[in-house]
Image (spheres, rainbow, N blue to C red):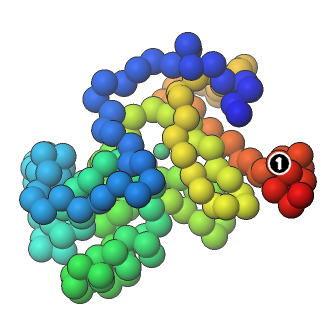
Amino acid sequence: MMPMMTPTDATPNTSAPDVCREGESLSVPRLSERARRCLQSLKRHAVRPTLQRRMIVAHIFEGCARHFSAERLHAELKDKRHRLSLATVYNTLHLLTRHRWLKEIVLDKEQTLFDSNISRHHHLYNIETQSIEDIAPVPVGTLPPLPPGISLESVEVVLRVRPSQNAERKNNA
Ligand SMILES: [Zn+2]
């Protein structure tokens, strides 16, 4: 499935949160350890833990790490009867990204996802089913030299894939 990547190169990140498996429950009734640490760290950076921010942080970090859009998160919060505007959700997600509690994955100019797994990893994105999954953070080949005065922080790749024609033919048979 991932011909160019060998998991042997991967550096295991023990601090990485568990990644949600499909069908697993996302709701844990109390403020998780990660949510608490996030709010404390924001406070240390003079970011006020407003009620809205607390609601969003609690919701994001209540289960295992996952990928979500601002719209989806907004809908989930609405289902929990949390009344927040989409703009507040967006602003908070960008704030959390700036403070490195989330990562932003730009799939194309219309689609951005947020990732609560902030450990170094790549993504496999199926353009037909629009599903996304984490893959091992293996090194990715030779990179062009960088201009002077800057240093490389990370390389994170989104592999855009689609079901191969053989698989399609099999499914249609
Ligand atoms: Zn991810």
**Residue shown at the point (86%, 51%) measured from the top left:** 170
Position of residue 40 relative to residue 111, above or below, is above
Assess disc 1: are there few (<14), some (14-19) or many (≥20) residues with their C-alpha within 10 Å of its C-alpha: few
Residue 94, image x and y in percent? Answer: 38, 61
Question: Residue 139: which quarter of the image?
Answer: top right
Residue 92, image x and y in percent? Answer: 30, 66
Q: Secondary structure at mark 1?
A: helix
**Of 116 and 89, which appears nearest the observer?**
116
Inspect this view and state whether residue 150 appears.
no
For the C terminus, the quadrant is bottom right
Total of numbered circles in the picture?
Answer: 1
Residue 16, image x and y in percent? Answer: 33, 33
Position of residue 35 relative to residue 7, above or below, is below
For the N terminus, the quadrant is top right
Asked whether, in this view, residue 145 is left or right of residue 137, the answer is: right
**Residue shown at the point (53%, 27%) measured from the top left:** 137
Report whether the residue tagged 1 is closer than 8 Å to ligand 1: no
**Of 60 and 79, which appears nearest the observer?**
79
Tell which residue pokes out farthest to the top in this image: 8
Question: Residue 53: which quarter of the image?
Answer: bottom left
Inspect this view and state whether residue 62 appears.
yes
Tell which residue pokes out farthest to the front in this image: 173
Asked whether, in this view, residue 96 is left or right of residue 110, the answer is: left
Asked whether, in this view, residue 118 is left or right of residue 80, the answer is: right
**Of 5 and 47, which appears nearest the observer?**
5
Residue 101, image x and y in percent? Answer: 30, 48
**Residue shown at the point (23%, 79%) measured from the top left:** 80
Position of residue 91 relative to residue 147, above or below, is below
**Residue shown at the point (12%, 71%) measured from the top left:** 50
Tag 1: amino acid? Ala
Q: Which residue is mark 1?
A: 167
